[in-house]
Amino acid sequence: MSGALSFSGYEPDDFYDEFFAEAGKPRDVVRTLVERIDGLPPGDLQNRQQAIERALMQMGITFAVYGDQQGAEKIFPFDIVPRIVSAIEWSHIEAGLKQRIEALNLFIDDIYHDQNILKDGVVPRNLLEDAASYRPECHGLNPPRGVWCHITGTDLIRDADGGIYVLEDNLRCPSGVSYVLQNRQLMKRSFPQVFAEMQVRPVIDYPIRLYETLRSLSPDVSDPKVVVLTPGICNSAYYEHSFLAQQMGVELVEGHDLAVRDGFVFMRTTRGYQRVHVIYRRIDDDFIDPLCFREDSVLGVPGLMDAYRNGRVALANAPGTGVADDKVIYAFVPEMIRYYLDREPILPNVPTYVCQREDDRKYVLEKLDKLVVKAANESGGYGMLIGPHATQEQRDEFGAKIRENPRNYIAQPTLSLSRVPTVVDDHFEGRHVDLRPYILYGDDLWVLPGGLTRVALRKGSLVVNSSQGGGSKDTWVIASTQSQLQTQAETQAQVQLQSQTQEAGQA
Amino acid sequence: MLSRVADAIFWMSRYVERAENLARFIDVTINMQIDTPGQAGDQWEPLINATGDHEEFKERYGEATARNVINFLTFDRDNPNSIVAVLRAARENARSIRETISSESWEQLNTFYHFVRDAANGDQIHKAPGDFFAEVKNRSHLLNGVTDGTMSHGEGWHFLNMGRLLERADKTSRILDVKYFTLLPRVEDVGSPIDYLQWSAVLRSVSGFETYRKRYHGIDVEQIVEFLILDRDFPRAIKYCLIHADESLHEISGSLTGTFVNPAEQCLGRLRAELAYRDVRSIINQGLHEFVDSLQTQLNQLGDAIFGTFIDPQPV
């Protein structure tokens, strides 16, 4: 079975392939890796892939198989062939993301204050007010330095034309960054030399940056108590919550570990109650405070919003931020960039038809067999119709839903997501991918070099969500300068090393 | 430290210790059967009694054969005190505090659980059960070593250490109680070769045979009872466990040894003082079973006091 995996015979077909411009012609940025893999002894790559899968099992990065009485568990599928992004392309993506997040943040701040963008007619008022994730309770809130979205994960795709497009924004609780860090750790074990040779930029300082971002939310306290708030062990992203808390060295708390007393937030410890200053909450707005939002929530903390409103605790992301995840609001982000920043968007949206507009709706209903239709407030690949792959019955069903509630739907052309070679049994086949980079917004904007590459493992599938047969790959961003190869911690460590040498010299 | 985290870490280590002790009990019973063919009578029934789930076993398995007892105590997921069930509980606790324990400890516990769970699917262990239970013990030792060597010995570790030692004290008292009860009613056995083998087996089940021999040389029931209850230095003796659990308890609250600032310290201090001034004669005169019964009641009260003091504190 263990023949040599090789790229000879690999077919990019009619898609944009991230590795091969045409069969047998690797792109410059991947050439070193392609040569390395083609030079491996037979069976070697498969062995490395299996070693990674064993390590994932050992680390317990698994999910339970529902209905299995024996407690069987599976790992999240991981493919050993990375996605590689050139330095030039990354600087374009990075600039585009910073611009987009800056504009989105200004938009959120605006709609919860003066609402100039509505008054000027750039975004229709009813679209905003009908968004399920719009929170009128948040009017007049003033998060520190006006930053609402501290942690964002933006989904990007590359279409057949080779261009990078923004598919959606995730400003609520974007997950997946723990996989970026774990995938990288495993890949470094598998290909230690290749990393140095190809000058891959490190991702390991994300937890330090995240901690600094969170700490910056409590500027008046010298050593603020930061915690990660999780819905609990049953949540599908629980592993990530505990991983991030561990990597940052902060407490992981559940709602019932916290209590609001005299207007301040405390956690219940073995030595009584201890004050909490900053909460990185991985719970949606709806559930964080039963007194303010959903009163049946048992995950949240009664009185939390009052404490927040009075500036006695900081929340990341700020409540109300999720309105930007609404897929109809998404359609207006290019307009926001022009409106707030007076610049053209660097990263374009995927062309989007807003079903509330009569012309768009008419077009969408005629072309249901060609388009992808999405409900405004769903995620994870749910509430979606992929026209070309759907039955007539499914299309009719969505048509009826659109007519009934046009505000709630958008449509986009069926995109031809780019592909990356992926191990399928004993050979490589192209599989469609997207990319979710992570952006932190504290004292300034910072983009993690890389992100989560999600891959649709089923042949021909365009759905990359892990709940629907998706897996992940490591993402390698190539450095353009030497300093990009250093993490913040390494830079600091070097300074320290230097001063020690001088002291030794003097003595 | 969060109260919920302290609770999880305490129970995580209790359950791991319970798994190890179950493996010890089963392993020693297997050896005893081999050493005393046809003579020792039924060794498997008392084992079920020692773990306290007698009725449930009778109902579901009937006869106490080696295979039935091993399956019930090792792989039965519906028996909350089987090895696989307590390891699962340990792992669920650990999973809820992954950010508190070291990654190394977590991975060790995770693979430990998978090892036992995978073994449940085959029949292999009935062919060489000794190997399997030796491996369970070794993995528990490995986990303890990894944890002690990678985790900061602060508050969290002291909760862990306390859980480990209190569970061990409880289990040592149980094995002693059951064996004493099974062996001594037969007056004619005292001093016979079987008696010697059986009491050696009790010592071996707590890895105490060699240490005991160095100290006392001959096999004598009273000395064995003294060794397992009142030895200060042997790590599976009850007194050792209580002394060091008490030290961890005082590290947690910061109060002086020999004083108390909460009900948990009061409870454990009293228990420790009682053992400090007991001699083995008085225990035998009281009746070993009565002594163990009272000890277990006090250990349960201590567990409740720890919960009330640290885990479920009243509002301040």
Image (spheres, coloured by chain):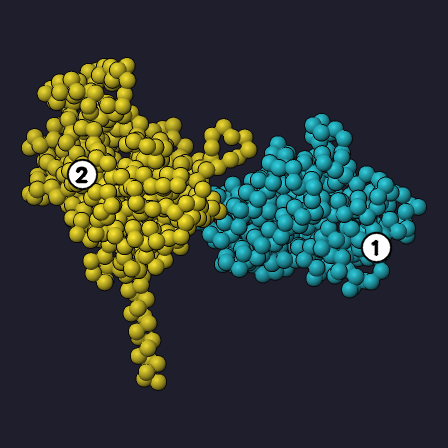
Chain colours: A yellow, B cyan
Q: Is residue B83 visible?
A: yes
Query: Residue A165, located in which quarter of the rendered image?
Result: top left
* Mark 2 burial class by Cα count in 10 Å: few <14, some 14-19, many 20+: some
Query: Measuring 30% from the left and 68% from the top, which residue is drawn there?
Result: A494
Q: Is residue B89 visible?
A: no
Frontmost residue, A449 versus A42 = A42
Query: Measuring 89% from the left and 43% from the top, which residue is drawn there?
Result: B186
* Mark 1 burial class by Cα count in 10 Å: few <14, some 14-19, many 20+: few
Disc assigned to residue A355: none
In the displayed structure, A363 sits above or below B49; it is above
Image coordinates of residue B93 in percent, x first then y, are: 52, 43
Image coordinates of residue B31 in percent, x first then y, are: 76, 47
Q: Find disc 1 in the rendering and name its residue.
A: B222
Query: Measuring 17% from the left and 52% from the top, which residue is drawn there?
Result: A88
* Element type where label 1 sits in the image: helix
Frontmost residue, B174 versus A279 = B174
Disc 1 from disc 2: Cα separation: 81 Å
Quick check: marks 1 and 2 in contact, CB under 8 Å?
no
Judged left or right of residue A318, residue B47 is right
* Residue, far bottom: A507
Disc assigned to residue A165: 2
* Element type where label 2 sits in the image: strand
Frontmost residue, A3 versus A212 = A3
Do the residues at pointers 1 and 2 share their chain?
no
Q: Nearer the viewer, mark 1 or mark 2?
A: 2
Judged left or right of residue A44, residue B31 is right
* Residue, far right: B188
Image coordinates of residue B198 in percent, x first then y, are: 82, 49
Query: Measuring 60% from the left and 44% from the top, which residue is drawn there?
Result: B15
Image coordinates of residue B8 in percent, x first then y, are: 52, 45
